[in-house]
Amino acid sequence: MNRSVRRRGRTSRATALGAAALVLAPLAAARTSGAVARPVPARSATSSAAGEWTTYGGSPSRTSAQPASPPLLPLRRRWTSARLDGPVYGEPLVLSGLVYVATESDSVYALRAATGAVAWRRSIGVPAPASLLPCGDISPVVGVTSTMVLDPANGTLLVSAETSRSGAVHHVLVALDARTGALRWERDLDQPGWTASAQLQRAALALDAGRVLVGFGGNYGDCSTYHGWLLAVPESGVGPTLSYRVPTAREGAIWGPSGVAVGPTGDVLVATGNGSSSTTYDHGDSVIELDPGLRPVGYFAPVDWASLNSSDADLGSTGPMLLSDGRVVQVGKGGVAYLLDSSRLGGIGGEVARLSTCFAIGGDAYLAPFAYLPCVDGSLEAVLVGTSALRPGWTAAPVDGASPTVAAGVVWTLGNPGHLLGTAARTGRVVVDLPVVPVEHYAAPAAGDGLLVVAGTSRVEAFAGPRGLVLAP
């Protein structure tokens, strides 16, 4: 479930290790429990087209890397936007000279990448007062909490919003024209039988096979009765909504801010929070693979899933990160990173490798051979990822548990409250430390059009390197 606590984790610091320190062993023998064996084509973890940032982490695989970035050092502030009408919890998106953000006041803004001026603004509803919710830590209103998603092929911006109508909470999915903000369609997301006020849409949206994927969990505090849900809504706005509900009696949230990961075959990887059972396995604290029709294909759960369920130690406090060879990195509140094989997740205890790391919430990043983890203890941890092993890399200066983004060979985080930090990707040495606007928990910068974009509690800021704005073709 969505937690904003600053829980302490492992704080030891390691000297940076060279990539050669990791021995890359052959892939461990595949485990068959909990999975259906199927041939899997080569996986791709590439970013959006050069310069774009159209979904959380820059790609459906959620690797949070921008390989097309121009040099960003020395980094300088390019602009600061006018004041917004509410805080931004989702990651900014960047496409064709525009920067997109949405606020908890249910407003969507398109800002000009060159200047930060408002190109258009669209209100998509009346946000829900926090007083309508059974618990939570977003106040005074709850509106757009997740990261939106853009489809460059048809110029559509998809936004999920919590709204208030006649004193009741409703969830809607809205499609806007990305160039003008004009409304294309709106769809109700609330499902029969659920308590709308108990469901929070925190996970980043994704696109898959012509559908928009929308994940749901609960409010901070695990109150009332909620379930983890994943919905697949036709991107055209026409046709039935597909759904998957985590098969637990209660909870099992799909809430990690980075959202679900989508592979090149269209299969979807979701990570769940704690379920309600401590006796019978209920798919809480798991990584679950679904086909494009949202039918279960396989799953993974740690051997101590029951203990994680009982202690609210969500494995799904981050989303799965899918690497180019089909490996998956998953880390959560339990302080353990798991390396999985997406072609055979392995069931309970079926990981390829595991490593004690840190209590993590947010989104990871990857630039071979390192995975970068958002540690809530105030550090950025790099883990060496081998074919069948995970090894400690380095631990960087305090970054306040922020989510990393890699661009131009630097890992960018929003840490040391009110600072943008740039850390050398291979050594952990801090090379940039600049003041920025205050940001919400687990915020991650976006990298597109040659900019690093930071969305905060009241404004948006953009930074650029010596080449300045670099628009994608």
Image: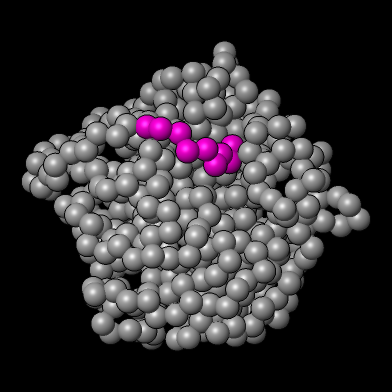
Q: Name the outermost residue toward the right.
A: 166
Instruction: Return the x and y of residue 463 as percentages of the image width and height.
Output: 37, 74
| 73 on left or right of 16 | right
Look at the magenta stretch and give its main secondary structure. Answer: loop
Quarter containing the N terminus: top right
Q: Which of the two residues, 238 or 354, is positioned nearer the viewer here?
A: 354
At a point 49% along the width and 28% down the height, the residue shown is 313
Quarter containing the C terminus: bottom left
Instruction: Return the x and y of residue 146 as percentages of the image width and height.
Output: 59, 56
Q: State which region is magenta.
A: 1-9
At a point 86% along the width and 57% down the height, the residue shown is 165
| 235 on left or right of 183 | left
At a point 63% along the width and 38% down the height, the residue shown is 220
| 408 on left or right of 144 | left
Instruction: Return the x and y of residue 128 as percentages of the image width and height.
Output: 77, 54
Instruction: Return the x and y of residue 289 as percentages of the image width and height.
Output: 49, 41
Is 107 drawn above or below residue 119 in the view shown? above
Is 146 drawn above or below residue 302 in the view shown? below
Inspect this view and state whether residue 363 appears: no
Is 364 drawn above or below residue 412 in the view shown? above
Q: Which of the two residues, 63 or 344, is positioned nearer the viewer here?
A: 63
